[in-house]
Structures are given as structure tokens and as C-alpha cells.
Image (spheres, rainbow, N blue to C red):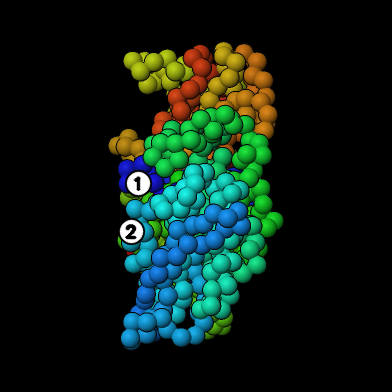
Amino acid sequence: MHEPTGTGSTPQALPLRRRTVCGVGVAAALTAALAPARPASAAPARTTAGVLGDPFFSYDRPTLFGAIREDVRVPLRDGSHLAAQLYRPAGPDGKAATGRFPGIVYEYTAYPARLEYFGYAASYFVARGYNALVCQVRGSGASPGTVDPFSPQEQRDNYDAIEWLARHPSSTGRIGQMGVSYGGHTSLLAAVNRPPHLKAIIPTNGLHDWYENTIYRGGIYSPRIRGWQQTFAPATLQTYAAHPLYDDFWRGRSVMAHWDRLTVPTLEINGWYDRYRDGMVKNYLARPDRVWLVSGPWEHGDPGNQYAGIGPGPYLAWWDRWLAGDPRAPLPAARITSYEIPGPGAGAGWHQWDQWPPRDAHTLTLALRGDGSLGAAPGARGEATFEANTGTDAPQSHQQLTFSTEALRRDLVLAGDAGASVRASFTATDGNIAAVLYDETPDGTRTRITAGWLKASHRHGHTALAPVTPGAFHGLDVHIWPTHYRIAAGHRLVLRISSDDYPEIDSDAPTGRVTLKVGAYGSAVRLTVRAAGRTSPVV
């Protein structure tokens, strides 16, 4: 969702998602990261010097029209309506141009304060021959009712808005939908509802599941969303708290629950610093035949004004191809276009591949060892402990464990998700595990890369609680969100295990001691990595 400025994720570095590819010996993989640099054997990216040469991203064409605005009321099947603004191509006389045009639901959103901006941005497409509709969801702005974000009712309304635009006398009947954050979520949900005239979508910062992405991370409530709820949908504060487990309430607000219905061409615009990066990657992994994924070094929001951002030209190419039916309009040169984030002291840039993770990626498994190191050889069996929620005055070292590799002798590129397989016992009847990865420079400065979280009672899934027996060891597989990040030679990869990671998750772990099995038959972290030499494309 496009929350107001100040509520987004702070860009510290990035995140990961777990997938096993290309079985590679653990010792050999670690040796590659810690060995002296040599020419990389990986297939090169399809880019030069980190600059995108793909014609898709430089596409544009001249304006053909002006734009006129009409305030409209979109009728809904239950007799209600949505307030909306319809922007149409105009001729030199300032009147609506004759003819029929493809249509774009430019934003279907709960942010009426941004209507003028949305109209201004939509005019780019209107001037090139598209109708554009900006809708205020039920209960927002001048639309009657109560806001219930991404609910089945809101989705039905969206379906009706798409079909209304398709029936408009100035429409060709070919409709697309796009939007940032809230509008990205609604675009994906519209697609899985399959209105007959929806032909393609462009979600930016979109979800795969409202429960997993935003509200309950690993079963732990995320406080990041509460301020937004209070402002835009206060009724959800009580409603969401009443559904701590994954049930039909959440399935009704999920793309994941209906991935089989995501059949229209989908151009996902993802930010490696964004809070929905995990969902965007999961949508691609679920439907690689339907989804093209563009992941940049972007925070939450429109990437157009951000570093290495892309303008509206690629979106126009997408609409010209799928809505206007122009075969000359290019598609992305590859399914995956991703910006490799440079950690401190590293160089990086754009790459394109035919799949994610890249074909040359492999799984690297590192054991959490008793001496606080991460390594391929697990070492002797042992245990390590920390105290959970001991209070704000407790020393930080009592509330977490850290494990570190040796200094890397060559760059290491994380290119995919990760996972922490934690064997843990709790003195309480439940507990939280937060697993955070850092890039540590030689002087000890740490940059946060990515993280994952899991409540112990949710270790077998979010639909039912799994009892936690105090003192007994339980296996917890913590999914760590995906990233594309380069750690420079000489740095260390650090894993922090704790019970807290505010404000990503609530500080609600029960007070008590957490013990981890380390060394042989103990805990480990799995990384998705690819070969890297000392140099890489640089923008």
C-alpha cells in the first residue's frame, strides 16, 4: 500500500526468499566465497556496465491528443456507486476526440487526497490514445460506504468498474489496470477475479497475500501497518486482531489463494527495499509463464523519481502491446530485470535473466557454530542461549545471538530468498524467532540486508497452532525475504537470531530463555547465491 511518507521501510539494504536450485556441494560453495578471486564461470548478464540497453525501457512515442476530465459515478451491482474521474483523449478544440480507445484503470485506491496527482500522471497515457479511470474505493473520498481494504466487496466493485469502462461508448473494450501500493494490490486482485475485458495489469509494490505480507509476518503482528489502519481503515484494528490465524477471512483478500487464476500478462514493478518484495517474487514464482518481474533499488512507492528509476515509457510499451495490439511495441528482453544492490564498497547494477533465481544460482548452507561463526563444516554439537523480552534496560547481548562468516576473499552475491532452519527450545509456551542478515564491513559497521520472522506456534503453518512444550526442542524453518545484493570481498555475512525485530514485528514474545542447537545436527542458514568476481556492472 502507498502509505503516507514516513511509514515505509527504511532502506538499510535488502531481503530474500527460499528456493533450492542446482545442487552444489556445501564445502565447494563456501570455498568459492572464501577463496581468492578468479574469473567467474557464470553466464554474463544481458546488460553492459549496469545500464539497461533493453528497448522496452526506453520506449516512447509522441503525444497525439490533449486530455479532458469528467467526474463520473460508476454504478455497482448492489445499487451503490464509486466516485471516479474519467480522463479521455481530446482534440485541438478541447473536446473529446472521436473514435474508440483502449482503457486503463489507472488507480483503484483509497487515497482521495492524491486524485489530482493521479490525474496528472494518467494524462501521459491519455495523450497517447488511452482512456484512464481513477476510482475511489468504496468508503473513500466521495464513494459511499466503509473502506474494507482488499475485501471481496472491494474486489467485486473493482470488477464492475473494469466492465463499466469497457462498455463506455469511447472504449474498444480492451482494459488494463495499474497502480502503486494500494493500486498494485487491487490490480493483482482484479486479475484473479478475471473480469472478461481485463487484458493485462501493471502492479507496483503489490501483495501476494495480505496476511503474510503485511499484517502477520510469520504469524507475528506487524506494528508497521497500525498507523495506516488508524488513518484509512480504523475498523480493521479490531477485525484483524480477531483473525490471528489464516482463515477464509484472509483467503478472501489473497492473490496466493487464487494463483491459478492469475492468467493475464502481468508486469510486476518491485523494489528491493520495499515491504512487498516477498509477495512480488512469490507471484512470479507461482506464475512464471504470466509474470515479468522488474526489481529495482527502490523504496516503497513510484520508482519514477528514485535512483535508477524508470519512467512511464515501459508501461506505455506494455499497454501498446496488450491493449492497443501493436506487435511492434516491445516486451522486456527477459522475464527478469533486476538491479544488483551494491553493499558498502561493492559495485553493482542492472542484470536480465530468463528466470529467478538466475540459472547459475545455487544453495549455500552454513551451520551456526558454537564459537559464533558461520561455516560449511558444522563443528561440535553445542547450545547457545539468549533471553527474550528481558526489558529495555537489559544488555543487547542478552537478547540476541550473532553468527558471522570469516572475511570474504571475493564478492558474494545473494540472488534469491533464504531460510534459517532453527532448532530451538523455549522456557515459555511460545516464542518468536527473528532472523536478520547483515553485511559487516572490516570496521564493524553493519548494513541490514534482509530478514524473516516466525512464531514458534506457527511452525507448521498459520491455519492452526502447534503447541510449544517448554524445554523441548522444536524445528522452525524461518523464511527470509528475497534480495539481490552484493557483499564485497573483505566483508562478513552476519546472521542475528533474536525474539524481536521492531517495528517489523510486535515485541510480544513471552519473557524467558531461548536455547538454540548449534554445530552438528543443529541450526543452519540457507542462502541462494551466485558466482561473483571482483567486478560487476556499475551504473
Q: Which residue is mark 2?
A: 306
**Residue depicted at x 57% and y 13%:** 427
Query: Are the residues tagged 1 and 2 within 8 Å (C-beta)?
Result: no
Q: Nearer the viewer, residue 459 or 444?
A: 459
Q: On the rendered image, what quadrant is the C terminus found in?
A: bottom left
- Is residue 358 positioned above or below 438 on the image? below
Please indicate, yes or no, whether residue 85 appears anywhere in the rendered image: yes
Q: Which residue is mark 1?
A: 4
Q: Nearer the viewer, residue 184 or 275?
A: 184
- Is residue 392 positioned above or below 538 on the image? above
Residue 151's spot in the image, x, y percent? 57, 46
Residue 349's spot in the image, x, y percent? 40, 61
Q: Judging from the image, what secondary structure is the residue with disc 1 in?
A: loop
Please indicate, yes or no, whether residue 366 appears anywhere in the rendered image: no
**Residue depicted at x 52% and y 44%:** 148
Given this view, does label 1 or label 2 mark the residue nearer the observer?
1
Amino acid type of the residue tagged 2 in the rendering: Gln
